[in-house]
Amino acid sequence: MSGQNNDNTVLIIGAGFAGLSAGIYARMNGYRAQIFEMHDKPGGLCTSWNRSGFTIDGCIHWLVGSSPETVMHDYWEETGLVPESEFIYMDEYARYETKDGRTLIFYSDLDRLEKHLLEFAPEDEDNIREFIKAVRMCLRLDQPSVKAPLFKRIAKMIKMILFFTVNGNKLKKWMKVTGTEYTSRFRNKDLQQALNELWFPEFSILFLFFIFAYLQKKNAGYPLGGSMPMSEKLEKRFINLGGEIHYKKKVVKIITENDKATGIQLEDGTIINGGRVISAADGYTTIFKMLEGKYTDESIRNMFDNWKLFPSLIFFGAGVNRTFGEIPLAVSGFSFPLKEPVVIAGERIERLPVHLFNHDPSLAPAGKTALTVMLHGNYDYWKNLSTDRPAYEREKAVIAEQIISLLEQRFPGISGQVEMTDVATPVTFERYTGNWKGSFEGWLLTPDNADSMLKPLPQGIPGLRGCYLCGQWIEPGGGLPTGVLSGRRLIKSICREDEKKFRTTTGS
Ligand SMILES: Cc1cc2nc3c(=O)[nH]c(=O)nc-3n(C[C@H](O)[C@H](O)[C@H](O)COP(=O)(O)OP(=O)(O)OC[C@H]3O[C@@H](n4cnc5c(N)ncnc54)[C@H](O)[C@@H]3O)c2cc1C
């Protein structure tokens, strides 16, 4: 990534959060930014869709950086998401109902969580105390907002340096422990299983500690209105800054000359030239299709050969004519045990995770509720099935019926209240967002790549000038904040290449 560039046009592939962020920061710094998006809407995975008066939200559970005390909040102000968004905070992260009728609650408040876990599983006192201690350690990792008074920022920066000096090795140790390794030490099987269910078992456990640290600090609220309004806010900010966005424009090729990116080619054959190309689209497509696999190195091959993917999903949505006042709001919902294990599209499940959107009245008519169920989907199974459209549609209808009958076990009578159902499969995710194998968040953050939490991955393409990556395929762990950080960091480094001071503004 070096060398001055005379053409100040930046061609950006993809209008997900990362592409929009790159566009926004490019405009703030005087580049001509053009986004090419294959869909007809902004947001990529951060999306929602309307069905029969209900809105199915396909993404947002929580947004890290909702607290004005934090530097991430500054970036949301720069990208136009705040102050326009109203956040709510839930008392619980998740609920886990056991086979013997008990309920394990993962409270957002740490003291309450510790007390409850100790009551639930006193035999795990040592493990619970260690868990809470690790979360408390993460609480102290805190980069202050640039709006904080200077003395406060300096004090916090000194605290951070001290923090890393004292705790750096502990952080590194936890980074290298997977969820499965960590939870195996718990004696209480329900607690062990529930912790495994909270996040991906292959994930670095450090991330789980951060989840509870964010909750405790009220730094991960739910933005009322859900996903699509968030994406529209970033789109608006980009356009208001003078950015150009072109929908229904699928990019098939990044054009190169003498190992320098010079433009892009669209599906209809149109060629657009520009000084730089940023792909904020799927990583595999970018490297192996748009660039035909000509620019790779050992580390890129290692990524695609060995790193683990967030799975693809069967994403069920329903609109029901009832409310669920008896079930408290929880960031990621609740799960209950099934009377008998069942097989859904080839996958055996013993519990059903349900996300009730009773906290957001904008997603359903009064007195009604939108709910979703997310299950792991087997990409190859669905890809094969999708070649026979009627069979694919039949399977989706069967799944909708199966899930409703499972919900009936927990909510007797619900089948008579269902007004709408919708099933998205791994193929749906692939078709709408292009993400490799329908993965819903790119790379899992595992001990293999957790170092990227401390040292971000390079955003250039080996051997190719003027071409860059941003978004979840270059940010293990994925997520909306990392998408925005990725776009911001990239434009900052492009400014550095051009020997320009990186500038930001706030607004909508
Ligand atoms: C069910 C679910 C729940 C989630 N919950 C949360 C949450 O609570 N909090 C959170 O922070 N994150 C959450 N995420 C993750 C978050 O949505 C993603 O990590 C993030 O949106 C990824 O942004 P991105 O811009 O990197 O990629 P994407 O959103 O995938 O954007 C890529 C864009 O590129 C476009 N594109 C692809 N190929 C081409 C092409 N050839 N030509 C033109 N355009 C192309 C796509 O259409 C898409 O718009 C969730 C995701 C899902 C699916």
Image (spheres, helix red, strand yellow):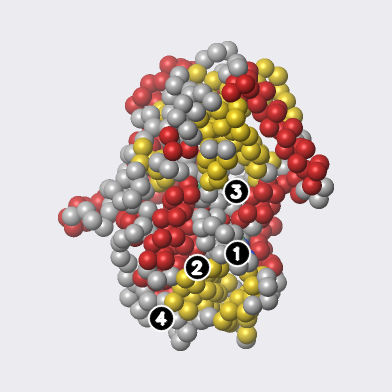
Q: Which mark is residue 498?
A: 4
Asked if the residues shown at circle 1 and circle 4 are in contact, with their CB atoms under 8 angstroms apart, the answer is no
| Point 36% across, 35% down: residue | 89
Sequence-first disc among 2 and 4: 2
Q: Is the CB of the residue bearing disc 3 within 8 angstroms of ligand 1?
A: yes
Sequence-first disc among 3 and 2: 2
Element at label 3: loop
Residue 322 seen from this side: yes
For the residue marked with disc 2, what is the amino acid? Ile
Q: Residues within 10 Å of mark 1 (few under 14, many from 20)?
A: few
| Point 58% across, 79% down: residue | 272
Asked if the residues shown at circle 3 and circle 4 are in contact, with their CB atoms under 8 angstroms apart, the answer is no
Asked if the residues shown at circle 3 and circle 2 are in contact, with their CB atoms under 8 angstroms apart, the answer is no
Asked if the residues shown at circle 2 and circle 4 are in contact, with their CB atoms under 8 angstroms apart, the answer is no
Element at label 2: strand
Residue behind mark 2: 245
* Residue mark closest to the camera, 3 vs 2: 2
Q: Which mark is residue 440?
A: 3
Q: Residues within 10 Å of mark 2 (few under 14, many from 20)?
A: many
Mark-to-mark CA distance, 3 and 4 = 35 Å
Q: Is the CB of the residue bearing disc 1 within 8 angstroms of ligand 1?
A: no
Residue behind mark 1: 248
Residue 118 spot, x, y in % from top left: 42, 20
For the residue marked with disc 3, what is the amino acid? Phe
Q: Residues within 10 Å of mark 3 (few under 14, many from 20)?
A: many
For the residue marked with disc 1, what is the amino acid? Lys
